[in-house]
Amino acid sequence: MKIEEIIKQPEGRRIEFKENLPTNALVLLSNDEIRERLFPYAKIECARFKGTVPGDFIDQKTIDSPLSFQAEESYKFVLRHISQGSKYEGVYRKDRWEYPVIAIREVIRNAVIHRDYSLKGQDIKIAVFDDKIEITNPGKLMPTIDFNDMESGQSDIRNKVLAPVFKKLGIIEQWGNGLRLIAEELKKYPEIKIEWSEPGFAFRVTFKKIYYEQLRTLSEKKTDYDRLRPITF
């Protein structure tokens, strides 16, 4: 939406103008040309890499739509590059992604809402590897949040104007529910562990396959065994 269209929306009226100028929140929510000039890094860079480290690209996409659309578009990118299996329970088929996708979607949404938009030259990065998914967000974790205690319903907001708008749009739910939702989803995936780190002035969440290294080691040993095994007739 253009800026003048946003201010016509009920949720847009409270973020209209400050001293006759559009606020940063209003600019970020629009697809007006002024957003590209003022916030050129308010975007998400998505990549699917070959292997387990950055290098050869299998696919990549820059998502620079208005903020309210970025989370869902990047989430769809992730879904395109992970597998979905299924099994039958009686006569019913049950589908299951290889990662806890609801938790991943929540982390992406939080990245968009809570990133530090004052940091120049940094964008959100989502990287899909063979063994993990990394979501890197400009800005360190809020000091009042303990990521190791996800189930306690903690809540703190960096962008206090954007967050209520996202809540009204249905992109986020009640305050403090996000981390609890992530923790609950991870319980359904014992083969996936979540790690977090703060590289530089960023916050990174990694969803990692616990058994990937073990499986790869076994596969390499099997290959070596097959190579060394004498040929018999």
Image (cartoon, rainbow, N blue to C red):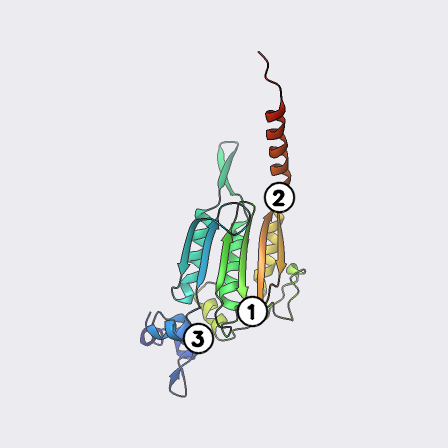
| For residue 39, side relative to residue 115 (left or right) | left
Q: Nearer the viewer, residue 202 or 158?
A: 202
Residue 100 in picture, x, y percent from top left = 55, 49
Residue 157 in picture, x, y percent from top left = 56, 71
Question: Which residue is tagged 1?
Answer: 139
* Residue at 62% over, 60% down: 197
Q: If you read the primary sequence from the N terminus, does the residue marked by circle 3 or circle 1 appear first?
A: 3
* Residue at 59% over, 14% down: 232
Disc 3 on helix, strand or loop? helix
Vertical placement of residue 204 versus 210, above or below: below
**Residue type for callout 3:** Ala
Question: Which residue is tagged 2?
Answer: 191
Question: Which residue is tagged 3?
Answer: 25
Residue 148 in picture, x, y percent from top left = 67, 60
- The answer to whether one can see residue 71 in this image is no
Tag 3 and tag 2, C-beta contact below 8 Å: no
